[in-house]
Amino acid sequence: MRGTQLPLNQTQKVRLQRALQQLESLSSKINSNASVTVADSIPVNYEDGVLKGHGTSELNGEIIATVCGIVERVNKLVYVRALRARYKPEVGDIIVGRVVEVAPKRWRIEINYSQDAVLMLSSMNLPDGIQRRRTAIDELNMRSIFEESDVICAEVRGFQHDGLHLQARSQKYGKLKRGQLLTVPPYLVKRRKQHFHYLEQYGIDVILGCNGFIWVGEHVEATDDMVEEQVSKSEQQTMNSDGILTDMEEQEQVSTPLEIRRYVCRAANAVRVLSTLGFIVTIEVIVEIVNLSSSMNLDIHEMLGSEFCVLVTEKEVERRTLTKKKG
Amino acid sequence: MEFVSPEGLRLDGRRPTEMRQIRAELGAVAKADGSAVFEMGNTKVVAAVYGPREVQNRSQQLSDQALVRCEYSMANFSTGDRMRKPKGDRRSTEISLVIRQTMEACIMTHLMPRSQIDIFVQVLQADGGTRSACINAATLALADAGIPMHDLVTSCSAGYLNSTPLLDLNYVEDSARGPDVTVGILPKLDKVTLLQRISCRLCMTDTTGEYKGIRISTRWINYNEG
């Protein structure tokens, strides 16, 4: 809830304040005294030995914070978790990014990190699904796979000497089409087992990228596409070399039904509301907000109004009280 | 002109060593990584930080540290007379450089190699001390962006008029053409990162006063060394 300026009327203001107060009282008090700003000294017990982690530095034998955040201690390690910062990649993270450049044998991808990530041609599956050496022809056809400003989904492979490398070794990764890309602060997306979500009831896909890029789009059957492609290939032996391209064009022509488009917008607006209120974005909450909005017969644009924001806050209070009681 | 009344009050009713009211607000620019609005009395400045991000001009990329860039500008409506100033005039280039050097000294640039940090500072209302207000705003914006820093820089100006040292000059006092100095300090490290424009105009009537004027500036220098 940072610098949010919603045009609230008096009752809404009171309700929002009360909800926020309740949220505050519900949040755990363990770390409340551990917040530091830049150059604050962090009290540590030197007898046990101390390991300085991220966000700390040493000055005159004292450990001081270099970012504003929360002090975290793990055994000997002392580090500061920044309140707001750019995305910090970890190996295995699923991320959504935008292609900014097609370079020799690689794509450069903007992922909200301090550098652009690199996706090598050799570290992704080709559309025909065959494992083989990448030839010069493949390199020339790179733009038929991803172009500049395409939105893609990939996995963090690790750091090499020339920066952060990505990989897209499965059919679930790749170009994202027919949907919306939303950017939220990266700390609102928590790492979980599952980042790809298919909401069957709406026919939409939601990908929660760890870097704070969230994709909401029409559902695509990743594996089925492959099979169909192979089937159609075996049927049409006369297909020319740029058969993949024509396939894509055919797919473009199929338009998304209006109903699905509405659900895409609803889910996207749910994410927007969560991000303005500063609540953690999880698939359960998105579904709940979409259901709430459709059960109230709200128009899609009304979801961004202040009344709905207040309602979502109150729902969040309810949910956290429930989880607290359970735990 | 009399800048300090016989009662020891300045034109805006402050004591000589009294600052103007300050106010800061974080998160003013939604799309930036970090941003802040900083007010010192009627001086109002907005700063936005983008980055660390990919270096735009590859030839400027540094393999061992981050590139810091700064752009200072004054809004057309910020001064009393609305003037259309050319972008990149001498004064704003100089202030951009000053802010860049000050911030570069406190950012831990070695932690973000091959990236770039952009700082944009714009003066919304100018009433003296824009330089120090800009530095304060830029520090807050950098802290908001979660960029690791050695310390927060704090800055303020001081001047010398009517045989009296004055803290935090406003526009009227600033344009009286007395000597003035802008200081930036790192409070935790106990160091001065910026000390600027000790423009002692030797037109003062009494020599003791001039001596005092120099003494306030030298005191800051001593502070640096000590």
Image (cartoon, coloured by chain):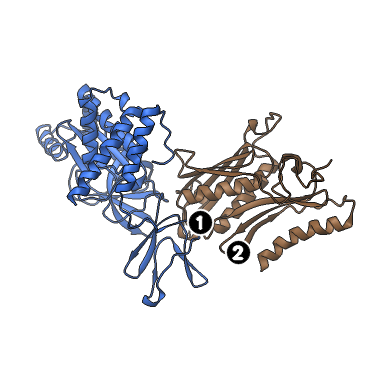
Chain colours: A blue, B brown
At x 56% / y 62%, what residue is drawn?
Answer: B188
Q: Label 1 neighbourhood size at 10 Å, few (<14), some (14-19), many (20+)?
A: some
Q: Position of residue B219 (x, y in %)?
A: 73, 62
Q: Position of residue A79 (x, y in %)?
A: 38, 62
User: Helix, strand, or loop for circle 2?
Assistant: loop
Q: Nearer the viewer, residue A276 or A307?
A: A307
Disc number placed over residue B190 in the picture, else none: 2
Q: Is residue A35 at least partly visible in the picture?
A: yes
**Quarter where residue B121 is shown:** top right
Disc number placed over residue B185 in the picture, else none: none
Mark earlier in primary sequence (1, 2): 1
Q: Position of residue A76 (x, y in %)?
A: 34, 70
User: Helix, strand, or loop for circle 1?
Assistant: loop
Q: Label 2 neighbourhood size at 10 Å, few (<14), some (14-19), many (20+)?
A: few
Chain to which the residue tagged by mark 1 belongs: B
Q: Is residue A299 left or right of residue B145?
A: left
Q: Is residue A69 left or right of residue B5?
A: left
Q: Is residue B176 left or right of residue A168?
A: right
Q: Which residue is mark 1?
A: B62
Is the same chain shared between marks 1 and 2? Answer: yes
Q: Nearer the viewer, residue A189 or A124?
A: A189
At x 28% / y 22%, what residue is drawn?
Answer: A299
Instruction: Give yes or no for contact between labels 1 and 2 (Cβ–Cβ under 8 Å).
Output: no
At x 57% / y 58%, what residue is drawn?
Answer: B105
C-alpha span from label 1 to label 2 = 29 Å
Q: Nearer the viewer, residue A91 or A286?
A: A286
Residue farthest along the right direction in this orientation: B205
On the rendered image, what quadrant is the N terminus of chain A found in? top left
Chain to which the residue tagged by mark 2 belongs: B
Q: Position of residue B102 (x, y in %)?
A: 60, 54
